[in-house]
Amino acid sequence: MGDITSAVGSLGSKTVNLLDDRRNVKQQKHNLYQNYAQTTQNRKNLLEKQLASRRAKLGASGIASSGSALAVQGRDIDEAYDDIRFETEKYKRKANQIDRDYESKMYLQGFDILSDPSKVIK
């Protein structure tokens, strides 16, 4: 009877650990997304400020628009969106890595339980 009680107790603690691990993974992914969203929004805001400043300078000098000014703005926009695409890919890689690490840990814990006969209820 003592073996069953200890096995059930061990299994119960493993279950609690698994639930805690899952909660931690969800929190990590949530924090990662929040950082990604904030970084992306900051980059867009900076781009808008840069473009507005450049338009104001051109307007103050009496130039409505010029080919070179539009080319510079286009380059700035392209660079900003390249940065955003890079951040998006980085976010996706990190989120996938968190999932892979969690799944790997789950498999290893499952094999630990199955490989130790004292942890299996007979």
Image (cartoon, grey):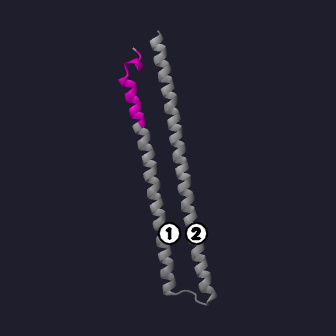
Which residue is disc 2 drawn over? 46
Query: Horizontally, is 116 left or right of 8 in the view?
Result: left
Q: Is residue 62 above or below residue 87?
A: below
Which residue is disc 1 drawn over? 80
Query: Residue 60 colored magenta?
Result: no
- The quadrant the C terminus occupies is top left
Sequence-wise, the earlier of marks 1 and 2 is 2
Residue count near mark 2 (Cα–Cα under 10 Å), binned few <14, some 14–19, many ≥20: few
Residue plotted at (45% across, 45% down): 98
| Residue 87 percent coordinates (x, y) | 48, 60
Residue found farthest to the right = 60
Residue plotted at (54% across, 61% down): 40
- Tell me the element at label 2: helix
Residue plotted at (41% across, 31% down): 109
Pick the front one: 67 or 87: 87
Residue found farthest to the left = 115
Residue found farthest to the top = 1
Three-letter amino acid code at the position of disc 1: Ala
- Tell me the element at label 1: helix
| Residue 115 percent coordinates (x, y) | 35, 24
Q: Label 1 vs label 2: CA separation?
A: 9 Å
Residue range in magenta is 105-121
Query: Residue 116 colored magenta?
Result: yes
The image quarter in which residue 100 lies: top left
Three-letter amino acid code at the position of disc 2: Leu
Q: Are marks 1 and 2 in contact (CB under 8 Å)?
A: yes
Q: Is residue 8 above or below residue 108?
A: above
